[in-house]
Amino acid sequence: MTRLSVNINKVATLRNARGGNLPDVEQFAKDCEGFGAEGITVHPRPDERHITRADVYALKDIVTTEFNIEGNPEPAFMELVLEVQPTQVTLVPDAREQLTSNHGWDTQMHFAKLTAIIQRFKNVGIRVSVFVDPDPVMVEYAAKAGADRVELYTGPYAELYDENPAAAIEMYRAAAEKAHELGIGLNAGHDLNLRNLNAFVSAFPWLDEVSIGQALIADALYLGIKETIKQYKYALSNSN
Ligand code: PXP
């Protein structure tokens, strides 16, 4: 079964807009787990525009499912993750000023750097996932660098899906199959939603985890977070 990790960045964005503690990010994480989320994802950025470093430390003691911290492995991020020791760290090559992550690593070009970073996290027992574009060569070099998993960047999948679902799936097939063949784990994330999620997991049933933020939080405005999580889990259950 593919696990649902709820990315709660946008809940922090809403809180930060006023400067108080409404909505309460930590309580929200707890409630997501209570409603069936199998993981909580955060992406603390250097400018703390949504999730702050203090949130990450607080969540460490709250999250009882899988805690996934994403980010660019700059020194301050590395130090935070090594201290908090989440279940998983997802390495993302996003620039500081970037609005959101929009590409994966060139794992071939950054092979030596990634190998060293991955080893540091694995030494303390943190599972490492590397964010990559759907290119089997990138998957192969991530595995060679020691990654436990890759996370496929699904932005282009979501963009093509509404127009041509079959072509959108085919664009990911070689990379998803390469991960399976190499025996590393497979995650996916970015722009996944209630329309496109089931087709992706049905095509690649060995998918370990999806992390979903933007669409899920937007759906919760209409459905409420409890019903939203239920519907995402139904889409993942592969039975429809
Ligand atoms: N995976 C990674 C690496 C991301 O950076 C993000 C966005 O923070 C997501 C998944 C979730 O994307 P979305 O918010 O579009 O669901």
Image (cartoon, rainbow, N blue to C red):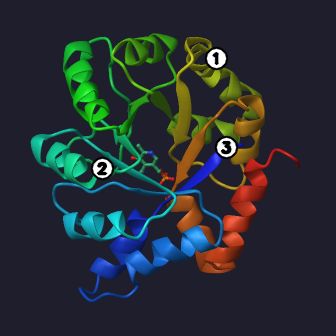
Badge 2 crowding class, 10 Å Cα cut-off, few under 14, some 14 to 19, many 20 or more, is: many
- Indicate whether 95 appears above or below 45: above
Residue denoted by label 1: 177
- Indicate whether 194 appears above or below 167: below
Q: Along the horizontal axis of the image, is 151 left or right of 224?
A: left
Q: Along the horizontal axis of the image, is 238 left or right of 65?
A: right
**How far is disc 2 from disc 1 in space, using C-alphas?**
30 Å
**N-terminal label among 1 and 3:** 3
Looking at mark 2, is its residue's CB closer than 8 Å to ligand 1?
no
Query: Tag 2, which secondary structure?
Result: loop
Check disc 1 and give the amino acid type. Glu
Residue 10 in picture, x, y percent from top left? 41, 67
Residue occupying the point 26% across, 19% down: 115
Q: Nearer the viewer, residue 44 or 66?
A: 66
**N-terminal label among 2 and 1:** 2
Query: Tag 3, which secondary structure?
Result: loop
Looking at mark 1, is its residue's CB closer than 8 Å to ligand 1?
no
Residue 173 in picture, x, y percent from top left? 66, 20
**How far is disc 1 from disc 3 in space, using C-alphas?**
16 Å
- Between circles 1 and 3, the one closer to the viewer is 3
- Between circles 2 and 3, the one closer to the viewer is 2
Which residue is farthest left?
75
**How far is disc 2 from disc 3 in space, using C-alphas?**
23 Å
Residue denoted by label 2: 85
Residue 4 in picture, x, y percent from top left? 61, 53
Residue occupying the point 35% across, 72% down: 12
Quarter where residue 178 is shown:
top right
Query: Tag 1, which secondary structure?
Result: helix
Residue denoted by label 3: 2
Check disc 2 and give the amino acid type. Gln
Q: Is residue 50 visible?
A: no
